[in-house]
Image (spheres, rainbow, N blue to C red):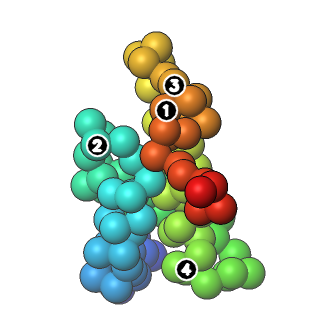
């Protein structure tokens, strides 16, 4: 088995083991208009391309999540702001009540 074939087999095994959990992580980290499946695909593409740089100092799962987090941050940085932002304290303050008030 060649080095590329072995690398492909390892990445495929990692995909089978971690793709679902990476999808859930991306799904809850992204705004609704961004597709978590694209993130998972990009994570494994980047993992394949940089497999030679994985030194095993952390688990493969940790490494994959680091790739996912960095990619999600990149996507969020590039996403244009809609300008519809309201500070949390202004838009949610009306639902707060004072339990000590009579």
Q: Position of residue 63 (x, y in %)?
A: 59, 71
Secondary-structure class at tag 1: helix
Q: Position of residue 5 (x, y in %)?
A: 34, 76
**Whole-number angstrom distance, CA of label 4 to CA of label 3:** 39 Å
- Specify the label residue 10 is tagged with: none
Q: Residue at x 55, y 80 (%)?
A: 60
Q: Are marks 1 and 2 in contact (CB under 8 Å)?
A: no
Which residue has dot 3 on it? Answer: 86
- Specify the label residue 91 is tagged with: 1
Secondary-structure class at tag 4: helix
Q: Which quarter of the image is occupied by the C terminus?
A: bottom right
User: Closer to the camera: disc 1 or disc 2?
Assistant: 1
Q: Nearer the viewer, residue 61 or 93?
A: 93
Q: Where 81 sits versus 67, above or below? A: above
- Binning the other alpha carbons within 10 Å of mark 1 as few (below 14), some (14 to 19) or many (20 upward) gives few
Which residue has dot 4 on it? Answer: 60
Q: Are marks 3 and 2 in contact (CB under 8 Å)?
A: no
Residue 76 is left or right of residue 20, and the answer is right
Q: Residue at x 59, y 62 (%)?
A: 99
Q: Where 57 sits versus 101, above or below? A: below
Residue situated furthest right in the rendering: 57
Of the residues under marks 3 and 1, which one precedes in the sequence?
3
Q: Are marks 2 and 4 in contact (CB under 8 Å)?
A: no
């Amino acid at each position: 088995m060649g080095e590329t074939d072995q690398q492909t087999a390892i990445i495929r095994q990692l995909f089978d083991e971690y793709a679902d959990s990476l999808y859930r992580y991306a799904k809850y980290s992204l705004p609704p208009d961004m597709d978590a499946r694209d993130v998972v695909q990009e994570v494994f593409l980047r993992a394949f391309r940089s497999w030679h740089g994985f030194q095993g100092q952390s688990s493969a799962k940790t490494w994959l999540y680091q790739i996912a987090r960095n990619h999600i941050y990149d996507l969020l940085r590039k996403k244009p702001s809609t300008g519809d932002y309201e500070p949390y304290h202004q838009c949610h303050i009306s639902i707060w009540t004072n339990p000590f008030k009579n």
